[in-house]
Image (spheres, rainbow, N blue to C red):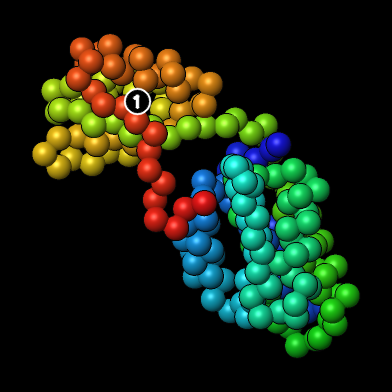
Amino acid sequence: MQTVAQPVEFEQVIRRSRFIGRLVPVEDRSQAALELERIRDRVPGARHHAAAIRVDGEPLLEHATDDGEPSGTAGRPILEVLRRHDLVDVLLVVSRVFGGVLLGAPGLVRAYAGTAALVVKAATLVPLVRTERLELDLSYPDWARVEAWVREAAIAVEVEFAGGVRARVRVPADLAGQVTERLVQATGGRARVSPARPPPGAG
């Protein structure tokens, strides 16, 4: 499996219609929905924002939308491009700014699939590293002891302060046990480490 290192965009004009493709890394369905709304705002003149997502997991999440185009002419072709490259943890959107010339169903399939393929070609693809989310509950003094190590180790972290510290970290799955042990040892066994609950709408 592969994923994308960073967002990438590609645009082409087909019979006066602009097709703007954008490939974005995402962690779950809720993040994909937020990214799709951002893309809608970026291309306000587009009538359609056809999209597909694939998110690694058990089971693998796949979803596609034609966003008003004839059924099967937009979202499904985009999804097939993601499948062909075995891409996961990504959202691929192709926005269409209509140019006044109807393409017909076969033309739409070619345009959406072709734009999606060119976006992927322009992207930097990297092997997927499966990750695990951990949730830490600890005191302010204990967080001060581990914060520098967490950030120096380039561990992605989100922190909430409310009567204590709740931190959510994302680490490579094969290192989750080591990270848990290090955090517990650094706080004298006081830190509570557990699998993070997914955000509402995730997955």
User: In this picture, is 139 found above or below 70?
Assistant: above
Of residues 42 and 31, the one drawn nearer to the viewer in this rendering: 31
Of residues 166 and 46, the one drawn nearer to the viewer in this rendering: 166
User: In this picture, is 185 found above or below 74?
Assistant: above
Where residue 20 sits in the image (x, y, percent)? 67, 65
Q: Is residue 27 left or right of residue 193?
A: right
Residue reaching furthest to the left: 163
Q: Is residue 169 left or right of residue 65?
A: left
Of residues 145 and 12, the one drawn nearer to the viewer in this rendering: 145
Residue visible at 65% across and 69% down? 65
Q: Is residue 66 left or right of residue 187?
A: right
Residue visible at 64% across and 75% down? 67
Residue reaching furthest to the front: 59
Query: For the N terminus, which image quadrant?
Result: top right
Where residue 165 sits in the image (x, y, percent)? 20, 34
- Quickly name the residue at label 1: 151
Residue 66 visible here: yes
Q: Tell me where residue 51 sits by quadrant.
A: bottom right
Residue visible at 60% across and 39% down? 5
Residue reaching furthest to the right: 106
Where residue 120 sits in the image (x, y, percent)? 73, 49
- Could you tell me the amino acid type at mark 1? Arg
Residue 169 visible here: no
Where residue 12 sits in the image (x, y, percent)? 75, 65
Residue visible at 49% across and 70% down? 41
User: In this picture, is 173 found above or below 66?
Assistant: above
User: In this picture, is 56 found above or below 11?
Assistant: above
Q: What SS does tag 1 mark?
A: helix
Q: How many numbered marks are there?
A: 1
